[in-house]
Amino acid sequence: MTQDELKQSVARAARDYVADRLPIGAILGVGTGSTANFFIDEIAGIKDRLGGTVASSEATAKRLAGHGMRVLDLNDVDAMGIYVDGADEIDGSMAMIKGGGGALTREKIVAAVAATFVCICDASKLVAVMGKFPLPVEVIPMARAHVARELAKLGGTPKLREGMVTDNGNLILDVHGLAITDPVGLEEQINQIVGVVTNGLFARRGADVLLLATMDGVQTRVR
Ligand code: 5RP
């Protein structure tokens, strides 16, 4: 199976998960990235069961709307049953690195509202220790150099993601060379740096369910 076929298989499994567990008429949160895109295409087939969707990026909102799905403002939503999104890395505690697509802030906000976070990815994303994938940190533009210096003190090598402006008008620093043995602690530490909007560690609120695409089928893990 190719990586795209693995993503397709986990997207289908996530559609079935949503169809089985999300009450008819409830709100679904939808993530960002190539795996999430496969999922969006899959849920087009069950759109009549959904009360509406909340998108974690402008790109996702556009794709959902392109399928004729209702996209709601998060401020108009009182409760969200399930949020489905990909990850760049996930460890055994269901902590994740996210933000490879630059949507980490909105993803974290939508995830905070959802009752259940369902992570969908292929087996290459499951790691023992996170950090091989550079950790994205969204920063206020005028704080870029200050935040980069502070991140370097934590042992990483921050690099500006060239040509990237987030949906919120900010910049992304990708932090290379970290070995993340304490994801919750590091998430909290980076959040304390003035000028940081969000960091891509989703550890305090990790995934509740992991649907993992392997060559032998999709495995389900529950936290
Ligand atoms: C976007 C994300 C994505 O979920 C993450 O980058 C994984 O993307 P893909 O499914 O394309 O591998 O966090 O900000």
Image: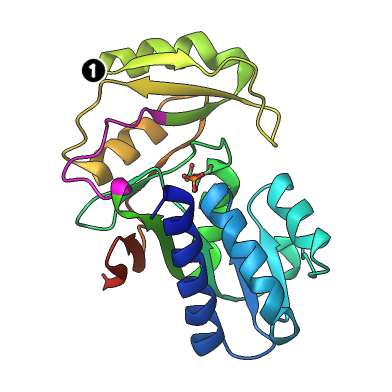
Q: Residue at x 23, y 50 (%)?
A: 91
Task: Count how many numbered circles sit on residues in the image.
Answer: 1
- Indicate the position of residue 143 as horizontal and vertical percent values: 55, 15
Can residue 164 be seen in the rendering of this structure? yes
Residue 214 placement, left or right of 87? left
- Indicate the position of residue 77 as horizontal and vertical percent values: 70, 71
Prevailing SS of the magenta stretch: loop
Q: Which residue is mark 1?
A: 155
Nearer to the camera, 77 or 72: 72
- Indicate the position of residue 20 as horizontal and vertical percent values: 50, 89
Q: How is the image coloured?
A: rainbow
- On screen, 184 above or below 163? below
Nearer to the camera, 218 or 169: 218
Nearer to the camera, 200 or 76: 200
- Indicate the position of residue 205 as horizontal and vertical percent values: 37, 57
Residue 169 placement, left or right of 145? right
Residue 214 on the magenta segment: no
Residue 19 is drawn in which quadrant?
bottom right
Can residue 192 be seen in the rendering of this structure? no
Q: Residue at x 58, y 41 (%)?
A: 103
Residue 78 placement, left or right of 6? right
**Residue at mark 1: C-beta within 8 A of ligand 1:** no
Please tell me whether mark 1 sits on a helix, a strand or a loop.
loop
Task: Classify the position of the N terminus by image quarter.
Answer: bottom left
Residue stretch in magenta: 124-135
Q: Residue at x 42, y 50 (%)?
A: 2
Task: Classify the position of the C terminus by image quarter.
Answer: bottom left
- On screen, 77 above or below 48? above
| Mark 1 surroundings: few (<14), some (14-19) or many (≥20) residues within 10 A | few
- On screen, 64 above or below 59? below
Residue type at mark 1: give it: Gly
